[in-house]
Image (tube, rainbow, N blue to C red):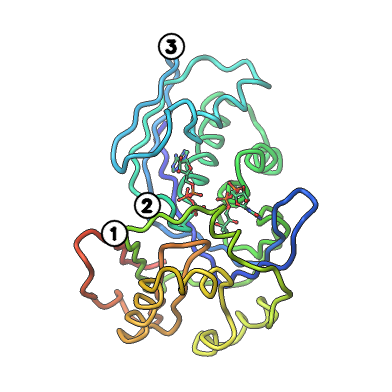
Amino acid sequence: MLVFPNAKLNLGLYITGLRPDGFRNLESVFVPLPWSDALEVLPATSGSLSLTGIPIPGEPSTNLCWRAYELLRADFDLPPVQMHLHKVVPIGAGLGGGSADAAFALRALNDLFDLNLPPETLEGYARRLGSDCAFFIQNTPVFAHEKGDAFTPITLNLTGTACKVIYPNLHISTAEAYARVVPRPPRHDLRASLAQPMKAWRDTVSNNFEDALTPHYPVLGELKGALYAAGAVYASLSGSGSAVYGLFPGQEMPPSLPAATDYLVWSGVL
Ligand SMILES: C[C@](O)(CO)[C@H](O)COP(=O)(O)OP(=O)(O)OC[C@H]1O[C@@H](n2ccc(N)nc2=O)[C@H](O)[C@@H]1O
Ligand SMILES: Nc1ncnc2c1ncn2[C@@H]1O[C@H](COP(=O)(O)OP(=O)(O)OP(=O)(O)O)[C@@H](O)[C@H]1O
């Protein structure tokens, strides 16, 4: 079975409080971004995970795809599997790439071995692998809250919107990024702000990580400025960075932008 774990973008991200478990409560809107890895899962006589594409730090046994398999194998009688992951989505980018791999592995195993687990049960397994993972089980735009793993449906449709995402070859660890932000209540109600025309978002929709990280990584501010200068109606850091995106509604494709050769760029429509 071949699946294509896609990335996500965060539209607004407010870190609202510290939780008793040491994690933070947040409010954000997650939307799928069609920048994808490729993951193959096959029944086999012995278990293995092979990797190509962007190198992933850590042993294959710690890879989130493999951890997803081990999580299900602890509860179900699964045969060995052969997995192959071709990594395309940059790591430490705030695009949820590793989380998507984990969630798509759960979904693929559920389908391949007829486990018939409903989405709510798969979300429960996904939450155990990371805060971002559960989103990718249903993979539709949602308002996310609590640890970023509790969802409320949202009527936001960005389908067909031209978008450019730039990863400035800078790995920002999620834990490091969280440590730099002081939680506080959001200045604006996120869902009410996103219900306004997109041209208003620049003043009302923000990502708390952006303010905390830009002084340490000025390239983030430079990229956002370049996207606005190129005509973006809204531009922001995604998640905990370092990827920065711009939205260009009404255009067939985003404009081309000069970028350093070691940057990774995705251009397309949502
Ligand atoms: C920044 C976001 O991408 C926004 O969507 C996510 O919150 C990150 O989710 P993730 O990469 O799945 O993060 P996890 O693997 O669950 O946690 C990594 C680390 O980030 C911090 N963390 C994460 C999520 C959260 N709600 N509060 C936190 O404080 C914790 O220090 C944790 O040890
Ligand atoms: N399949 C995978 N893809 C990416 N990273 C993985 C994977 N499996 C395990 N990891 C580990 O997770 C770490 C990346 O997590 P990190 O949260 O920084 O980035 P991310 O997956 O790109 O998502 P985000 O930055 O949006 O949270 C890597 O350092 C790596 O050790």
Q: Position of residue 59 (x, y in %)?
A: 42, 28
Q: Which amino acid does the dot numbered 1 rest on? A: Leu
Q: Which amino acid does the dot numbered 2 rest on? A: Pro
User: Residue at 74% across / 64% down in the picture?
Assistant: 17
Task: Give the residue at mark 1.
Answer: 264
Q: Residue furthest right?
A: 20
How many residues crowd around disc 2 within 10 Å: few (fewer than 14), some, or many (20 or more)? Answer: many
Q: Residue 73 occupies which quadrant of the picture?
A: top right
Mark 1 near mark 2, Cβ–Cβ under 8 Å? yes
Total labels: the figure holds 3
Q: Secondary structure at mark 2?
A: loop
Mark 1 near mark 3, Cβ–Cβ under 8 Å? no
How many residues crowd around disc 3 within 10 Å: few (fewer than 14), some, or many (20 or more)? Answer: few
- C-alpha span from label 1 to label 3: 35 Å
The disc, 2 or 3, on the residue closer to the chain's N-terminal end is 3
Q: Secondary structure at mark 3?
A: loop
Q: Which mark is residue 90?
A: 2
Residue nearer the viewer, 55 or 65 = 55
Please give left or right for residue 61 compared with residue 196 in the image: left
Q: Position of residue 229 (x, y in %)?
A: 32, 87
Q: Position of residue 254 (x, y in %)?
A: 30, 75
The disc, 1 or 3, on the residue closer to the chain's N-terminal end is 3
Q: Position of residue 45 (x, y in %)?
A: 43, 10
User: Residue at 55% across / 41% down in the picture?
Assistant: 103
Task: Give the residue at mark 3.
Answer: 46
Q: Is mark 2 within 8 Å of ligand 2?
A: yes
Q: Residue 256 occupies which quadrant of the picture?
A: bottom left
User: Residue at 53% across / 54% down in the picture?
Assistant: 174
